């Protein structure tokens, strides 16, 4: 557990205006299958989404970065995130805790020559992560909670309002919740072992 507490967990996520991705269950009769009160609408056009990057570590909520509109590029990831909020956070945690590592998944922007060179040049300790692996990153649970909180708010009218809401809700994420999902890592790993690499409740 002491090793898990020294890992900085990072990830990207997409948040859409008015998009509630949570599964909903209803009690209904056979005749109410298509009644409006039993259906959650979806929106297929004109949607505005925001891509974000965030980081957490045990006992600490890390920085949040909002990507500019358009395709996510490696240059933005390296220049605006790794060289910006990430390195400051990584340095701070490293000064507090020895043998700090950071986790990122196998997304294309994490595997460019530019990113790998920067990691080496700055002596960043990276947690080995399989290219095709069970998604055990506790950040997924943080994103789920963040989106749930946003969906409880008044629906933002545009991208700018959505960004403000995202930042407000990110700042309110409870450290106890962060600790709980990170402290579940031993159970997550054991669940993968027990299922022989198959699906788990996580």
Image (cartoon, helix red, strand yellow):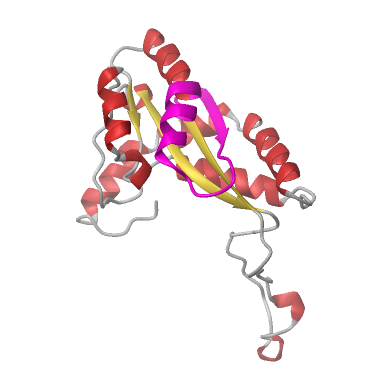
Task: Give the percent coordinates (x, y) of residue 73.
Answer: 44, 42
Q: Quadrant of residue 68?
A: top right
> What residue is drawn where x is 31% and y is 17%?
122
Say above or below: 152 vs 175: below
> What residue is drawn where x is 23% and y is 52%?
194
From which residue to which does the magenta span run? Answer: 57-85
Task: Give the percent coordinates (x, y) of residue 104.
Answer: 35, 37
Q: Quadrant of residue 22?
A: bottom right
**What is the count of numbered marks?**
0
Task: Give the percent coordinates (x, y) of residue 41.
Answer: 69, 71
The N terminus: image quadrant: top left
Say whether residue 106 is visible: yes
Query: Position of 201 compared to 12: left or right?
Result: left
Extreme residue toward the bottom, this view? 31
Task: Give the percent coordinates (x, y) of residue 113.
Answer: 27, 35
> What residue is drawn where x is 66% and y is 55%?
48
Query: Position of 155 compared to 102: left or right?
Result: right
Q: Is residue 44 part of the magenta span, yes or no?
A: no
Foreground of the two, 20 or 184: 20
Say above or below: 15 vs 77: below
Q: Is residue 58 part of the magenta span, yes or no?
A: yes
Foreground of the two, 199 or 62: 62
Say above or below: 141 vs 20: above
Query: Position of 18 compared to 138: left or right?
Result: right
> What residue is drawn where x is 75% and y is 50%?
158
Say above or below: 90 vs 202: above
Foreground of the two, 129 or 25: 129
Say whether residue 59 is visible: no
């Amino acid at each position: 557990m002491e090793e898990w507490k020294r890992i900085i967990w990072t990830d990207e996520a997409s948040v859409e205006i008015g998009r509630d991705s949570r599964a909903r269950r209803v009690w209904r009769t056979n005749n109410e299958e298509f009644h409006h009160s039993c259906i959650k609408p979806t929106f297929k056009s004109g949607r505005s989404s925001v891509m974000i990057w965030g980081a957490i570590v045990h006992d600490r909520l890390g920085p949040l970065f909002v990507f500019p509109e358009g395709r996510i590029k490696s240059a933005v990831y390296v220049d605006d995130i790794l060289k910006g909020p990430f390195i400051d956070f990584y340095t701070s945690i490293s000064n507090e805790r020895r043998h700090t590592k950071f986790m990122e998944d196998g997304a294309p922007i994490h595997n460019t020559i530019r990113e790998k060179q920067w990691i080496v040049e700055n002596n960043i300790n990276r947690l080995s992560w399989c290219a095709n692996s069970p998604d055990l990153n506790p950040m997924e649970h943080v994103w789920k909670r963040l989106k749930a909180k946003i969906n409880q708010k008044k629906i933002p009218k545009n991208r700018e309002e959505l960004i403000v809401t995202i930042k407000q809700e990110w700042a309110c994420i409870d450290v106890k919740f962060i600790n709980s999902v990170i402290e579940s890592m031993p159970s997550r790993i054991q669940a993968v072992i027990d299922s022989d690499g198959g699906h788990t409740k996580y």
